[in-house]
Amino acid sequence: MGIHNEPGVNRLKSIPSSSELASKVLKLLLDQNDPDRAFVPFSAGDKTVLLVNNLGGISNLELFAFAGLVVDQLALKYEMSPVRVYTGTFMTSLNGPGISVTLLNHSRLKDRKLVLAALDAKTSALAWSGNVTAWDRIGKLDLRPSPPEKTNEYVVQISADPATFTKILQGAANALIQAEPEITEYDTIGVPH
């Protein structure tokens, strides 16, 4: 999915488990037989720099659990290990409920030390939350799948006056229409340095 909810590479019919989602994302990033995305070569044994980004609406618990799954699958399925892991809210879509994964092939860099020094450098950028240079965990996180969705629809019966509801809805719509120029202006303003 795009940062503003643009369509992604495919539409899923159901929400996969975290492990399945990590597997799908890594396949999109690492499948060397995919001519649309295999422009960065990766192979077993490569060292990587991994960035797991929160689009804004994921809790730290979920974010780090997902990052752990990605690190595990990189090792088990692709025989790759990250030399740095960046996990945090770096680029958001306000409170978008999603995660992005970025991989840099550290093994294929011309000047590996220079790139790591730049990534490790101190910064005053507020969103840059630093890195993890080792990802050692004791034990395995027991992620359980969500319970199956209920197929029965539950309809709550609430009595409401249709005329009052219509006035409320029209008032909200009119307020939004009147505020549109100001909202658009805020959407185009950059943060001054």
Image (cartoon, helix red, strand yellow):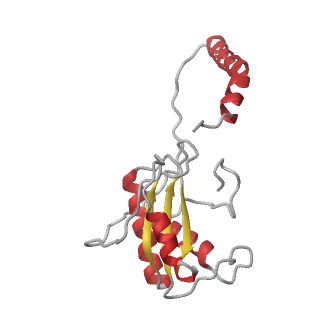
Residue 17 showing in the rendered view: no
Which one is in front, 111 or 18?
A: 111
| Depicted 147 relative to depicted 71: above or below | above
Which one is in front, 157 or 14?
A: 14
Q: Quadrant of the C terminus?
A: top right
Name the residue rendered at 58%, 81% in the picture.
Answer: 110
Question: In the image, residue 109 lies at what x, y percent?
Answer: 57, 79
Which one is in front, 26 or 107?
A: 107
| Depicted 138 relative to depicted 175: above or below | below
| Depicted 20 relative to depicted 149: above or below | below
Q: Is 158 on the left-hand or right-hand side of 177?
A: left
Question: In the image, residue 22 lies at what x, y percent?
Answer: 50, 68
Q: Quadrant of residue 24?
A: bottom right
Name the residue rendered at 63%, 15% in the picture.
Answer: 168
Q: Is 16 on the left-hand or right-hand side of 31?
A: left
Q: Is 138 on the left-hand or right-hand side of 83?
A: left
| Depicted 174 relative to depicted 42: above or below | above
Name the residue rendered at 41%, 49% in the picture.
Answer: 59
Residue ranking furthest to the left: 138
Residue ranking furthest to the bottom: 44
Question: In the image, residue 83 lies at what x, y percent?
Answer: 43, 75
Q: Quadrant of the N terminus?
A: bottom right
Residue 156 showing in the rendered view: yes
Name the residue rendered at 56%, 87% in the picture.
Answer: 43
Question: In the image, residue 33 lies at what x, y percent?
Answer: 69, 84
Q: Quadrant of residue 135?
A: bottom left
